[in-house]
Image (tube, rainbow, N blue to C red):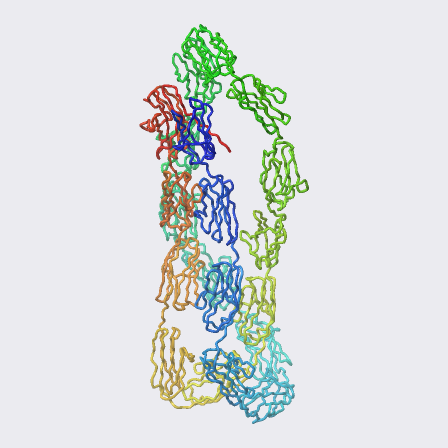
Amino acid sequence: MEAEEGSTAVLHCEITTPNAHVEWKKGSVALHLNEKYEIKQKGSCVELLIHNLKLEDAGKYTCLTKDQETSASLKVTVLPVLFKEKLQNVEAEEDSTATLHCLISKPDAPVKWRKGSLLLHPCKKYEMKQKDLYVELLIRSLKLEDAGEYSCDSGDQQTAAFLKVEALPVLFNQVLQNEEAEEDSTVILRCEITKPNGSVQWRKGSLVIHPSDKYDMVQKGSCLELHIHNLKLEDIGEYICDSGDQQTMASLKVNALPLLFKQELKDEEVEEGGTATLHCEVNNPDAPVKWRKGSLVLHPSEKYEMKQEGSSVDLLIHSLKPEDGGDYTCYSGDQQTTASLTVKVLPVLFKQGLQNIEAEESSSAILRCELTKPDVLVEWRKGSVVLNPSEKYDMVQNGACIELIIRNLKPEDEGEYTCDSGDLQTTAFLIVKVLPGLFKQELENTEADEDGIAIFCCEITKPGAKVEWRKGTVALHSNDKYEIRHEGPCIQLFIRNLKPEDQGEYTCDSGDQQTTAFLQVNALPVLFKQELQNVEAEEGSTAKLRCELTKVDATVEWRKESVALVPCGKYEMKQLGPIMELLIHDVEPEDAADYTCDSGDKQSTAHLKVNALPVLFKEQLRSEEAEEGDLVTFHCELTKSGALVKWKKGSKILHPNNKYEMKQVGAIVELLIHNVNTEDTGEYTCDSGDQQTDGYLKVNALPVLFKRWLKNEEAEEGHSVILHCELTKPDATVEWRKGPEVLKPDDKYEMKQKGHIVELLVHNLKLEDTGEYTCDSGDQQTTASLTIRAPDVKIIDGLKNFEVVEGGDALFECKLSHDNARGVQWILEGIELQSNDMNEISVKNGNIHTILLRKITQDDTGTLIFKVGKYTSSAQLNVKATPATFTKQLQSMEVDENETATLVCELSQSNVPAIWKKGLTTIVFSDKYEIKQEGCIHKLCIHNITSSDTSEYTCISGDHQTTSSLTVKVSEVKIIEGLKNVTVFANENAVFECKVHPESFLDVQWLLGDTPLQHNEMNEISVKHGNIHTLKLKSVTQEDCGTVVIKVGKHSSSAELLVKVAPVHFIKKLQSQEGDEGNVISMRCELSKADASVTWKKGFRKLTQSDKYQLLQDGSVVELLIHNLMPEDAGEYTCDSSDDQTKAKLSVKVVFKQKLQDIQAKEESTVFLHCELSECEVPVTWKKGSVTIIPSRKYEVRQQGPMADLVISDLTLEDAGEYTCESGDQQTSASLRVEALPAYFKQELQNVEAIEGNTVTLHCELSKPGDPVEWKKRLAVVHPSDKYEMKQNGVNVEMLIHNVKPGDAGKYTCYSGNHQTTASLNVTERVIKIVSDLKNTDVFAGESATFECELSDKDVENTQWWLDGSPLQNNDLNEITVQNGNIHTLTLQGLGTDDSGTVTFKAGTLTSSAKLLVKDPAVEVVSEMEDVTREENDTAEFICQYSRPVKALWRRNDKEILPDGHHIIIDQDWNVAKLKICELTPADSGMYTCEAAGTKVAAVLSVLAKHPDILEGLENVDAVEGGEALFECSLSRPEVHYYKWLMDDVPITQTENQETAVLQAGRRHILLLKNLIPSDSCQVSFVCGNAMSSACLNVKGWHISILNTLRDTEVVRGNHAEFECVLSEVVPITEVSWYLNETDIKTNEHWETKAERNIYKLILKNAQFIHSGEITFASRDVIASAKLAILGPPDPPEDPEVVRKNHQSVTLSWFPPLSDGSSVIQGYHVEMKPQESDCWLQCNTKAIEETEFTVDNLVPGTGYRFRVSALNCVGAGEPVHLPQTVLLGEKCKCILVACSLLFYS
């Protein structure tokens, strides 16, 4: 037998001897009565009950008697271990412990824990607990990597939950401490974080620190250290350690090493005006030092020059004044050295005093005097008014000579002027003669031709008087257009290159008078000196039309026919003086036309003829091969862009439609054929009209595969069934087969096909339609099994008993539910009847089955059975014989108790049946009554006689009977075991028992109180085992309490009946619930008694009726309503009836009482998102989109009570989006829209004052970065130039105005949208002084003389050099240069003795002069220079030797070379001049000359450039289509000019998709390629000089194809299976996915994935049935599928039974197994085992194909056991045993009764 685990199994047998002793064994172990085993025995029935079945209870159980034993096997079916309560998702903090728990259905069943696919084992990390049904996993010391999915697997089921680990913030246990260290030492900054190995960032100020020789970063667990080596003073500052959640800061102070003075300062004494040098030496080279004069700290200036070279320190004090005397100190830290400087003061006297002078108005007056001391500051006064330099007054001081120049004399300039030197003063008087300014000759009107010159002339009475010329009101100034001449009293205005717009009134204004005249300009007509000429051009070339005008720069209009032309890519218009040209590019046939050039006065026309080029093919079509369904592109290139073409397939012209797409871009022509099929195969032609090109398309038909396979179907006989599958190709031809037979459409088979779906409809199903059906596409086939079930034929109207007289006929009928039922059997007394002369079997109306039994004899009496399928109907056939009479009557008799009485009678006929009765009760054969018939003799044996057997006994045969009396002699009556008190609850039954002697004593009376009891529905009186008298009082009430009495004869026994009130228990229990806060919830249960009183409790608190709690009761249903749910209402609630109670838990969900609202706000504002929870202080999480918001300056999270707010400050456009507030599983969301603000100026421009020549910065600040601005000066837009530099960095906007001039003064405005800000620039003219005067110079003839004058300001304009009153210009003889902007130099070359004279330099009103003396000795060159060739970084030296000592001047390419002490070294040793150039570069190449004393020697220096080496070359790059590739090359030295990038040896140019960059001043070169396509794959090279580096670029296309697809696989359960897919290219394993039945396959103990180049494999290990289904491979845009079938042995066949048997054969029948093990059943095996044998013998020699089999040649009288097993390709499955032993030839004496199962919950 078979029973489920946990249930009770009952083994039952029956023995021949009642109450005989038996022994039970399991195997060889004897069993005894206990909790496990319960042994029952009632008479001959013996039972063994095995409780709470376990797996170990399975086995063989034996029941033994003295003579015999019987055995049976018990199989225990394991119950699956399921989850009563599944895992729940858990969220925990890092470093805490997380607990996952669940409840299983089976106590202490083993489970496995996994994280993902990883099996977990108990350790310090994981603790696994299990107590009864409770299973728990504790995960300790949580880390972020512990987050993930955890599953608990019971073997039969699994449950999973997700663990979320919230990272702890990384805080500082120990913060940084300020540190102090000495220079050149190492300092360590330490801190400690709360999280070992947490990531931090070190910064110095805002600069991120990275590991280097300077900085070492050490992290040991939670301890962090920053080591700063070789400390310098610049390392001083704030250092920050930032963990992301917190930061700590410390200051580092670096103490400089003490500085000592090796040589102290020495006292110095210097004359006034000279330069003093204070010198000392320190022990620390380059150590910073400071200088003081007294307590005043000195800074570098024109006065003080500070030098420090190595350990030598100098202070130079220039232009000594008396006040410069004093103590000077050089100090560093606490070290210092001091020396005293004494300045010798010279007295200031006047060698020559001022002289009175007289001058005319408008002229200049010069007052001169001479001091005894040069460069002494003096003060000029007019009267008592101090004069300052200006346009009016020019104060010139040349050494000791002092001049005051008073310009443009006015009458008010007359007066006394004084020069005061401080010690002395001199005075003189100036008289001014006033002159009037009048016109002696006025202007006259003038007329002139265009392009000519007009001259206006007038004469003024005051020579040199200033006049102003105006045209209308516009003042005129001298330039290329206007020339103003003033020669004495004659004033002239020349107007050149006259234009019509020059016409108008011109005025000359002297201030005292003005004169005006009119100029008329006669315009010249614009004519053609050379007309346009007809032009002929080829298509695609450029045509040029040319003409010449009589007038330069005249405006013309070009026209094509009557259409005016404008410059564009097609038309290019040029004008070179009078020459006009029209260029027509890329000439096309439609450009042929007349073209006209119109000057306004005249026009010229010419015709353009265009010779069209034939449209040919630069690139021909290529033949293509494609697979069915692909997109095919035919591509060719024309010689002519935009030319029309025709596409043909064969001779058929193609037109654009869904099938054909035609593209043309320029000269490229394409034909795209979509979704190609085999009909598209053929030749395609592209015809341009002049030429055509052909290409052949071959379309390879795709194999017709199955996307969806046939499925096994099962249907009932007579119905229809549909087999359907899905193809990869619509409307493909398929063939249907049943087994090997090809099916054709007919009434039986209907074949349908719609697109990809193919169907086979099989109508009017018959059992013979069962079999395998195949759909064959030619390339693949799919097969499914069709199983036809016989209809479930039921018996509607069964057989009726029939009685017939012997020799007559009997007709039996049975009506079925279906017509034409099969397998119908008629059986009479175990013998199947066949239709013959005696038995006529027929069917009426299809479903009424009849049998006519003819000439019936008494032997035919018995049971007739009709059997169809599993249904049977039986009826009794009674054959009446000739009535028999009693020849011998029964005789009355008297016997003693416990004896056996035999009653005998005799009939007149043998074998006539008779019926025995006791009184009116029919007696049947039993242990008590033994009925015997021997021929005509009938006997009734009554065993174990008791008093109850006293009665009349009758034997009846037909209509005859015989009766006799049996009297039992009764022994003495007594009560063996009396009544016992009984206590029950109301409505229960009360049972009283009394055991009496003898058995079957009839004089028994029951009483309740004094009331006699009778047997009825309420009082059940019975006798068990003959002597146990039982009274059962049903459904007693409390009124039934009292004494129960039994009277037996003269004896009696009594007992008390106590009836208690029935306890009230719960029929329906309370159920745990979850409710939303604020709602009403109902808790309901049902009692066993209506209106019973109950008590409600929450925890231990009793609940009463209130607004909160409403207590309801309707009959037996009680209900608790809880209003306005609050979180504190959560807990356990109890309903108590005093006899019973039920409990349930209530949980309250927190909800949002007020949800977030959508909001709109302006940029830069602050917005509040507000919601209200139903509970105070509930933790919430804010999110923007899916990103959790962390409080910061941007986001402020507030929560007070139930109110939750999110404050978003300083809104930006990026802040727009959806915001969510989450609390548990509740959430509310709202959208924030941010309205952009126009940019405005947060900081306005500020007025600026600047000194001429400086750079000015105008600065403002916008409210938002990146907004464009526009600068204007007044109304004119300012554009970037050398003058104006515009900068914009974020919100900061600047404009730099370089080298400001007075004309730059004015208002400047910065515009941003509608906002603007304005500021004024005020430019102060600088006061220029001569810092260093010219020096007298003596040179020899032929030499050069150099004069230098240093001004106080740079870039001074209006400077002029003079030699003896003649102005000098810059040329070969006179080289005029300016060094550093303020040192003006004049070099006079090739001097002769007659060049001696005075050299004067004038800058505005300033003048400086010096004497030049040219001497005449001759100088010769003794040794000339030689050409030199050197390599880069070498040293070159030029030597020139002269006949006498000279001062040589070195030049390179005619430019003077100045020594710098490093690169250029110039040395002069008596008569030898040397030039040494170190660390040569290619830029040093050139012509070098040495000039001295009129001689010039030249030589060429050639520097051979060294090519840089490549330090880090290019590396191969693999990229994906549409992506980017970056190539980088590092050089050994900078190179920004001589390099190039190549792609397949073709130079790369900068485009949108090709960008190059040079970094680190030319040491790093980068190439970025964008928007890559597969055709971009190439070799990339970088070339620099002789060095080259190359790498390969491999661009992988996204589109791939499958070369070898998956194949359907069958595998036996427990074996391995492998799937393989080959792609057209290698794809990263991360882009490959495998699926089983559309579920992602993860690598585990069953599945393994492999990738070898482009071959991808999926391996299944230990295959199980759950792995059956569809395997899918997916990568990028391809997908492949295959079927996986897991094969196993079939299940046991169903319902085996014995359908027929005789003395030597047995016919067995069974049904197919429920599961065929995924393989077709090939047949069955039948085995037998004789009763006395332990060996099973196979009955069949080959597989049995049917489900019925007859076993022959059996031994009569022998018992056999049979079993049947199913067979498939894997092998034989488990057998099914027939439940009984089959005995042949004689009645079975002992059988094993089928066990019944009892299930207890």
Q: Is residue 1103 above or below residue 217?
A: above
Residue 1082 coordinates in the image, percent (x, y): 62, 39
Q: Is residue 240 above or below residue 909?
A: below
Residue placed at 49% from the left, 18% from the top? 797
Q: Is residue 320 above or below residue 1736?
A: below
**Does residue 666 appear anywhere in the picture?**
yes
Q: Residue furthest front?
A: 972
**Does residue 852 appear anywhere in the picture?**
no
Q: Nearer the viewer, residue 1321 or 4?
A: 4
The answer to which image quadrant residue 1297 occupies is bottom right
Q: Residue furthest bottom?
A: 351
In-image side of 1168 versus 496 (left or right)? right
Q: Nearer the viewer, residue 1329 or 252?
A: 252
Residue 908 coordinates in the image, percent (x, y): 43, 6
The answer to which image quadrant residue 1583 occupies is bottom left
Q: Is residue 117 above or below residue 1282?
A: above
Residue 724 coordinates in the image, percent (x, y): 43, 34
The answer to which image quadrant residue 1433 occupies is bottom left
Q: Nearer the viewer, residue 936 or 19?
A: 19
